[in-house]
């Protein structure tokens, strides 16, 4: 039985969130293809993790017998999150763009699961794990657009999750999501609607493909 780890980080609930809506379409396709599979869900907005502090960081470099009570508690939390990731056969990550980058709650999760000597480098325990990222954004930061240089979601996640941790990334990018609510973007509504329709279609296709891939492995 394959396991999908589904992580949302949007501040907006339910269908008011573009990333959550697309992610749910992916999950529905996954379940349709793999009804006996398990979905482990973590909502980082509803239940945020504490940001990495000195105790949580230093605990990874101290033997268990030498850790303080604070370090032991922080390390236990990190190990729980890492093991949750290691047990997954695939990951679905909701990563809306806030102020040009990922939500701080998602950054906190990454800081906890990134552990030198365990989930990084050539011997990473999560190397090759397929991850689908729903990278929604109000505007467009695609190559050739005026704001291309301000794209710090896909670029950051590729660097940290793919290059450093060895995860295999695939992106679904619903863009121009603010077009319907921003009068200055009214002329971009047709492009926004095409992007949205494409994102929903991609979520279904990738949800099915991912389920087939991990169950065939």
Image: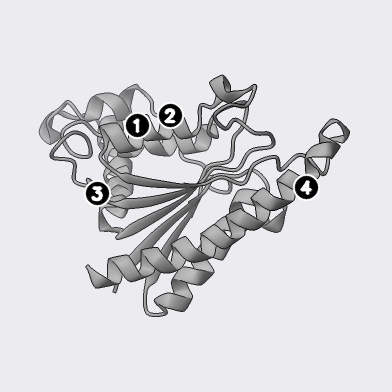
Q: Which residue is mark 3?
A: 128
Q: Rounded to the nearest whole Å, what is the CA distance between mark 2 and mark 1?
A: 6 Å
Marks 2/1 in contact by CB < 8 Å: the verdict is: yes
Q: CA distance from mark 4 to mark 1?
A: 34 Å
Task: Give the spatial CA distance, label 3 vs label 4.
Answer: 37 Å
Dot placed on the residue nearer the N-terminal end, 3 or 4: 3
- Tell me where residue 57 appears, x and y as whole percent: 29, 26
Q: Is residue 23 left or right of residue 163?
A: right
Does the image show residue 17?
no
Closer to viewer: mark 4 or mark 1: 4
Is disc 1 placed on a helix, strand or loop?
Answer: helix
* In front: label 3 or label 4: 4
Marks 2,3: beta carbons within 8 A: no
Q: CA distance from mark 4 to mark 2?
A: 29 Å
Q: Report if the CB atoms under discs 3 and 4 are less than 8 Å apart.
A: no
Horizontal side of 203 relative to 66 (left or right) equals right
Please state which of residues 13 and 181 is positioned toward the viewer in this rendering.
Answer: 181
Residue identifier under label 2: 156
Label 4 or label 2, whichever comes before in sequence order: 2
Residue carrying label 4: 190
**Residue 135: image x %, image y %?**
54, 42
Find residue 98 and report its image quarter: top right
Q: Which residue is mark 1?
A: 160
- Upstream in the sequence, badge 2 or badge 3? 3
* Relative to 200, 154 lies left or right: left
Whether residue 95 is situated above or below residue 65 in the rendered picture: below
């Amino acid at each position: 039985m394959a396991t999908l780890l589904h992580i949302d980080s949007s501040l907006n609930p339910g269908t008011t969130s573009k990333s959550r809506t697309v992610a749910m379409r992916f999950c529905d396709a996954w379940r349709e293809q793999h009804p006996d599979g398990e979905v482990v869900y973590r909502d980082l907005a509803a239940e945020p993790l504490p940001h990495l502090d000195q105790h949580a960081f230093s605990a990874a470099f101290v033997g268990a017998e030498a850790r303080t009570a604070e370090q032991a508690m922080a390390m236990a939390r990190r190990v729980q999150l890492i093991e949750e990731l290691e047990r997954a056969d695939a990951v679905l990550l909701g990563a809306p763009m806030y102020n040009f980058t990922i939500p701080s709650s998602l950054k906190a999760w990454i800081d906890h699961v990134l552990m030198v000597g365990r989930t990084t480098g050539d011997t990473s325990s999560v190397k090759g794990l397929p991850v689908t990222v729903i990278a929604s954004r109000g505007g467009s930061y695609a190559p050739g657009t005026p704001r291309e240089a301000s794209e710090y979601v896909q670029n950051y996640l590729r660097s940290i999750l793919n290059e450093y941790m060895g995860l295999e990334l695939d992106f679904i990018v619903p863009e121009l999501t603010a077009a319907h609510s921003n009068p200055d973007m009214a002329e971009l509504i047709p492009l926004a609607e095409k992007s949205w329709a494409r994102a929903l279609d991609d979520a279904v296709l990738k949800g099915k493909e991912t389920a087939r891939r991990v169950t065939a492995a």
